[in-house]
Image (tube, helix red, strand yellow):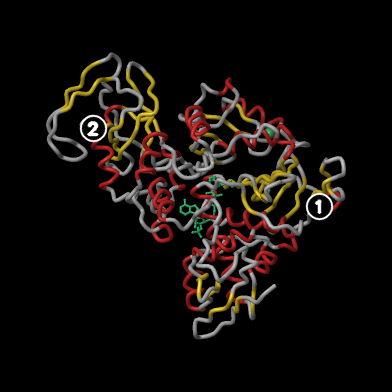
Amino acid sequence: MAALAGMEEEAEAPSAELDAEAAGLDDPDEPPPPLELDDLAVGSDENAELLNGSSMYFEKGGGIPVDPVVTNLSEDLGDMRDLDFKEPLRSNGSNGRLLSLSPSLSGGGGSMQMFDSGGEDAGSCRKRKNRVLLPLEVGTKLTCRWRDDKYHPVTIIERKKVNDEYHYYVHYSEFNRRLDEWVKLDQLNLDATEADAVEKVEDKGLKMTRHQKRKIDETHVEEGHEDFDAASLREHEEITKVKNIGKIELGRYEIDTWYFSPFPPEYSDCNKLFFCEFCLAFVKRKEQLQRHMRKCDLKHPPGDEIYRNGSLSMFEVDGRKNKVYSQNLCYLAKLFLDHKTLYYDVDLFLFYILCECDDRGCHMVGYFSKEKHSEEGYNLACILTLPPYQRKGYGKFLIAFSYELSKKETKVGTPERPLSDLGLLSYRGYWTRVLLDILKKHRGNVSIKELTDMTAIRSEDVINTLQQLELIQYRKGQYVICADPKLLDRHLKAAGRSGLEVDPSKLIWTPYKEQEDGSLMKTYSSKKAAHKASGV
Ligand code: ACO
Ligand code: ZN
């Protein structure tokens, strides 16, 4: 293997040659070959715009919406999760959701009618005269007053009659689908024609390509669905277009859901589901949950506790051994994961459940799943931090944990694609921080392969990240890593907090081993080695 990148901490920006072979690159005499970066394409302007345009964030704390058209991911993304859950139900309730809409005016729905709107346009203050047929048709594009009291372009996805009044399920073209919601007629600006709505997207500075616009217009789908073909995308969209469960109660929290989840049909008529926070059984009524809680003797997830550090524990749950728990977890997780198909065959997966433990038990904070055997080299299938716990570093902890497992397996790994917007942000942040930390400390040359060996991060993700950071350049026929310490520091600062650390010495785990007959077994019973689940 040829030589490699010098990472000495020198005052001058030291450039070192990067092992082109190790980086999976071809003859360096050729003009710069495209650093074939995987399906993330994180650097492209196109993607960045989509990401910005489709996610909605709020400033922390106040719950006051900021302008949804965010132009700088690292600087401007606030925190929208604050809006998605109530603080402990035991509190006095003053921390209610901030979803309140203005009081309903008369719906005007019910029978078919022509709405003759004239005069002042509430959204744009332009005079116009439009004739709108009520009730509004599915597919109609207009603008809708949102939580920031501004009008945003929407498409009507569905409508329903509630007490003689039509309610409309709308998708905001500028935001991620998790912000789709039911609204009443008085929130809709009937003066905003279809053309106005499209115009507004452009006004907002969302410089979208025609392709992106078509994507939003036709399928109202954003990032994370690139791997779907058009037919499956339409099918996915049709089935999942309206959230079926509005909120859930889980432990101390009531949480607004984000997406559709295919709960059995008998649960389709209830807006709220009640989950047992330990066994994840779900029921339709609070009294049923209370009855269940009196009988349920679990105080932590089933399976083996494979990590404990202070009040944090990780449990490994085998989908084959704990089928019902694993299926319930999948139903629950799908409420917050848009682009994942629900696997009914949980046998093939292991689930790693992160818990915060106290004297009442081990409370699930988040989890990730992992195939027992992945042809594609995935070390993580789905990852979720429950909304009340988001933006506290648990996501980075879960990601780091997945790589610690890969290290124990002496494999490199990568998360299953496609990544969601939040998944991409979290992974990008994790990769950046891990690689920069090494580059900062490392003395002497280092190859992509060595970086991969040290971190268990797949080489494409290493290259991709370094290229994003503009740390790889093509000079005189060769790729070099430019590791200017000042630049590294700047990037590290921008990479944000490091999150909760995983202490590898606290991980008691052995990898699964494939048997000759294709079945998977632990090399020895993890039960013997692992802490016995504490049962606090
Ligand atoms: N706004 C802006 N940046 C965000 C946000 C947000 N709402 N959420 C995460 N980030 C970025 C930030 O850079 C953050 O670091 P910082 O807080 O230091 O700035 C970083 O991601 C990770 O933050 P964590 O607190 O460590 O992660 P969190 O516990 O919030 O979990 C996760 C991240 C798992 C992606 C969570 O957002 C989630 O569960 N989302 C819903 C499900 C999902 O999309 N999962 C990924 C699907 S892809 C897959 O499964 C392979
Ligand atoms: Zn239970």
Q: Quadrant of the N terminus?
A: bottom right
> Would you say the beta carbon of the disc 1 residue lies within 8 angstroms of ligand 2?
no
Residue at the (53%, 60%) spot, across then down: 429
Q: Is residue 233 left or right of residue 150?
A: right
Checking the image for residue 491, the label placed there is none
The location of residue 498, given as percent across then percent down, is: 56, 64
* Mark 2 neighbour density, 10 Å: few (under 14) some (14–19) many (20 or more): some
Residue 409 is left or right of residue 139, and the answer is right
Do the residues bearing badges 1 and 2 touch, measured as CB atoms within 8 Å?
Answer: no
Query: Percent position (x, y) of residue 13?
Result: 50, 81
Name the residue rendered at 48%, 42% in the picture.
85
Residue ID for mark 1 = 530
Q: Amino acid at mark 2?
A: Thr
User: Which residue type does callout 1 highlight?
Assistant: Ala
The residue beneath circle 2 is 193
Regarding mark 1 in the picture, which secondary structure is present there? loop
Q: Quick one: which residue is furthest to the top in this view?
A: 111
Quadrant of residue 307 within the rendered picture: bottom right
Q: Position of residue 405 (x, y in %)?
A: 72, 55
Q: CA distance from mark 1 to mark 2?
A: 63 Å
Point 51% across, 76% down: residue: 476
Q: How many numbered discs sit on the rendered protein?
A: 2
- Asked if 243 appears above or below 63 in the picture, the reply is above
- Is tag 1's residue or tag 2's residue first in the polypeptide sequence? 2
- Determine whether the residue tagged by mark 2 lies in a helix, strand or loop: loop
- Horizontal side, residue 400 vs residue 323: left or right: left
In the image, farthest residue toward the front:
30
Mark 1, mark 2: which one is toward the viewer?
Answer: 2
Residue 75 versus residue 514 in the image, above or below: below
At label 1, counting other C-alpha atoms closer than 10 Å, the crowd grade (few under 14, some 14-19, many 20 or more) is some
Residue 346: image location, x then y, percent = 70, 36
